[in-house]
Image: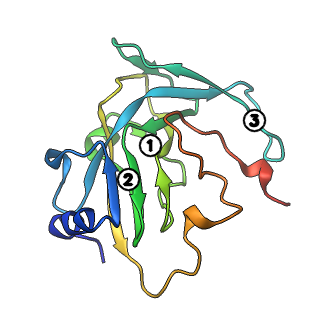
Amino acid sequence: MILSDKRILEEIEKGTIVISPYDRKYLGTNSYDVHLGKYLATYRDRILDARQHNEIEHFEIPEEGYVLQPGTLYLGVTLEYTETHAHVPFLEGKSSTGRLGIDIHATAGKGDVGFCNTWTLEISCAQPVRVYAGMPIGQLIYFVVEGDVETFYNKKGNAKYNGRTIRPVESMMWKNEF
């Protein structure tokens, strides 16, 4: 089940969902709109290696916007910091974003119960498109969890994305054993 607007508000009141900054006008019927933060990043190397630490270069989106180019993976970040302590959060693109040819995640749209951070976005585009810091970029939806959670994400010792950040975070695949 997906939480309705009233249930999202109840969970915010209880503290099981935290959104900061929060503005009631961004609450939809069953989602909450999130916005593009002011930082983007690209990988330094054109060829990435899953076993190596692929470094990124951060840059700030200028006031006049930044033109995304096809064929480049951009890492973005949500303006909003979120915490989800009792539900499974999913981040999806807004239809208006998709109609501009922008994908906001390659595969990582699902968060874990206990995820507490901003969301790193894996942004790609179908054609050149100008984006702006603060523009609506996606929407969070919340699913009910069936059963008890043994280990929340923010309590896992091996969680790779627990450090609070306002900048996009590169892949930490290299920390896995394979």
Instruction: Find residue 54 and name its label.
Output: 3
Residue 131 vertical position relative to residue 108 in the rendered view, above or below: above
Q: CA distance from mark 1 to mark 3?
A: 20 Å
Instruction: Count numbered badges in the picture.
Output: 3
Q: Image point 41% across, 79% down: which residue? A: 145
Q: Amino acid at mark 1?
A: Ile
Identify the amino acid type marked 2: Glu
| Image position, residue 169 (x, y; %) | 60, 39
Q: Report x, y in % for residue 175.
A: 78, 52
Label 1 belongs to which residue? 104
The quadrant in which residue 168 appears is: top right
Q: Secondary structure beneath disc 2?
A: strand
Quadrant housing the N terminus: bottom left
Would you name the residue on which mark 2 appears?
A: 92
Nearer mark to the viewer, of 2 and 3? 3
Q: Is residue 138 above or below residue 124?
A: below
Task: Tell me the element at label 3.
Answer: loop
Can I make out residue 139 in this image? Answer: no
Image check: 54 left or right of 42? right
Whether pointer 2 and pointer 1 mark residues with C-beta atoms closer than 8 Å, the reply is yes
User: Alpha-carbon distance for marks 2 and 1?
Assistant: 8 Å
Colour scheme of the picture: rainbow
Crowding near pointer 1: few (<14 within 10 Å), some, many (20+)?
A: many
Of the residues under marks 1 and 3, which one precedes in the sequence? 3
Residue at 59%, 75% (x, y): give it: 151
Q: Amino acid at mark 3?
A: Asn
Question: Residue drawn at (43%, 19%), measured in percent from left and top?
Answer: 61
Q: Nearer the viewer, mark 1 or mark 3?
A: 3
Residue at disc 1, secondary structure: loop
Q: Residue at x 49, y 35 (%)?
A: 166
| Labelled pair 1, 3 in contact (Cβ < 8 Å) | no
Q: CA distance from mark 2 to mark 3?
A: 25 Å
